[in-house]
Image (cartoon, helix red, strand yellow):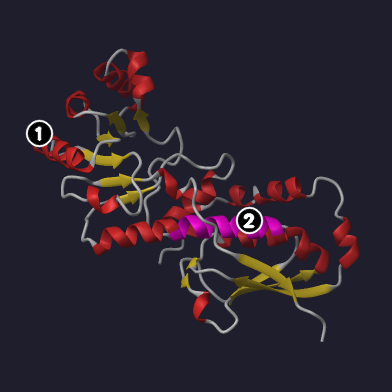
């Protein structure tokens, strides 16, 4: 797979130092207990899923002067349930005992959450491909404040699309924008003044009529929001017939179980906020090895 770690600029990897400071704003009494003797810790993966978040895990321990040797790779699908111990050795971390335990929780929190997003994304994409659907499964902007880059990164590791990365990377005109502007057409025309030719404009539509108005006004993407599956597929077909170049997105309350009901040759994207909001974390633990 692609090395998604190359997406991350060095300044972002240094952000993890803020996370560590947040967890230990003053002193670490536990660090006094264990001391600074060199130790080895094993990272165990204890529930099935996709491994994601390796660059962030590494950055936590790099900032503390520890080293990490991975036994699994970013994007690997791992199932510990078949192991006699019920767990898989994911990595070996070495460094002073106090530093290993200082970085432990921050590193595990990041890795388990990133892996949870990647696992949910992988499951959704797997359903789409199993049904032979051609389109993109995407996350949304329903991310954790301050943790957006990790969750968006993990979507990519899991094989899904990120949708817009943030408020600045694409224009999405929703009901509040449209009501404030006065109409869909007015909202799109105002957006085009600043969007120019480099940013796509998406409009949220609740009916076929709204979708048609958005496309006629120049929207690049039309989101059919909170429609019943058959109603949505009929609207998508009519919209594509009239505006073949428009990207059609389905969204609103779509779950892993109901997603197949929305598959259609006329639907290009299915977005699900639950991929970054309400995902299950993958279980990891870090254990310092006992002295022989």
Vertical comparison of 163 with 280: above or below = above
Q: Which residue, given by chain and number where applicable, does mark 1 sit on? A: 242
Q: Residue furthest top?
A: 182
Viewer-proximal residue among 127 and 221: 127
Specify the label residue 203 is tagged with: none
Assess whether residue 116 is covered by the magenta stretch: yes
Q: Is residue 59 visible?
A: no
Residue 32 in view (yes/no):
yes
Which span is picked out in magenta? 105-119
Q: How many marks?
A: 2
Residue 177 quadrant: top left
Identify the residue at image location x=89%, y=56%: 29
At mark 2, the secondary structure is helix
- Residue 81 at x, y = what percent? 51, 76
Q: Residue at x 14, y 35 (%)?
A: 239
Q: Which residue is mark 2?
A: 109
Question: Is 149 a magenta residue?
Answer: no
Residue 109, located in which quarter of the rendered image?
Answer: bottom right
Secondary structure that dominates the magenta span: helix
| Quarter residue 286 falls in | bottom right
For label 2, the crowd category at 10 Å Cα-Cα, with few meaning under 14, some 14 to 19 and many 20 or more, is: some
Q: Position of residue 89 (x, y in %)?
A: 60, 77
Within 10 Å of disc 1 (Cα), the crowding (few <14, some 14-19, many 20+) is few
């Amino acid at each position: 797979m692609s090395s998604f770690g190359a997406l991350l600029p060095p300044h972002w990897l240094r952000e993890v130092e803020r996370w560590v400071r947040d967890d230990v704003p003053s002193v670490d009494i536990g660090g006094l207990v264990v001391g600074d003797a060199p130790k080895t810790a094993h990272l165990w993966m204890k529930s099935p899923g996709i491994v994601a978040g390796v660059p962030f895990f590494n950055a936590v321990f790099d900032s503390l002067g520890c080293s990490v040797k991975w036994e699994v790779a970013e994007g690997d699908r791992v199932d510990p349930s078949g192991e006699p111990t019920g767990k898989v050795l994911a990595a070996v971390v070495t460094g002073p005992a106090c530093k290993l335990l200082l970085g432990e929780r921050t590193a595990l929190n990041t890795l388990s959450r990133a892996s949870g997003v990647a696992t949910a994304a992988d499951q959704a994409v797997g359903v789409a491909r199993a049904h032979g659907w051609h389109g993109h499964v995407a996350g949304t902007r329903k991310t954790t404040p301050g943790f957006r880059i990790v969750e968006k990164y993990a979507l990519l590791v899991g094989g899904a699309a990120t949708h817009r990365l943030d408020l600045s990377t694409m224009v999405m005109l929703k009901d509040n924008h449209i009501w404030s502007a006065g109409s869909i057409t007015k909202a799109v025309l105002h957006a085009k003044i600043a969007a120019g030719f480099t940013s796509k404009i998406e409009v949220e539509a609740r009916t076929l009529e709204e979708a048609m108005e958005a496309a006629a006004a120049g929207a690049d993407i039309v989101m059919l929001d909170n429609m019943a599956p058959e109603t949505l597929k009929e609207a998508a077909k009519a919209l594509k017939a009239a505006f073949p170049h428009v990207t059609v997105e389905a969204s609103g309350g779509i779950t892993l179980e109901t997603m197949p009901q929305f598959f259609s040759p006329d639907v290009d994207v299915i977005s699900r906020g639950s991929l970054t909001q309400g995902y299950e974390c993958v279980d990891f633990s870090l254990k310092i090895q006992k002295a022989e």
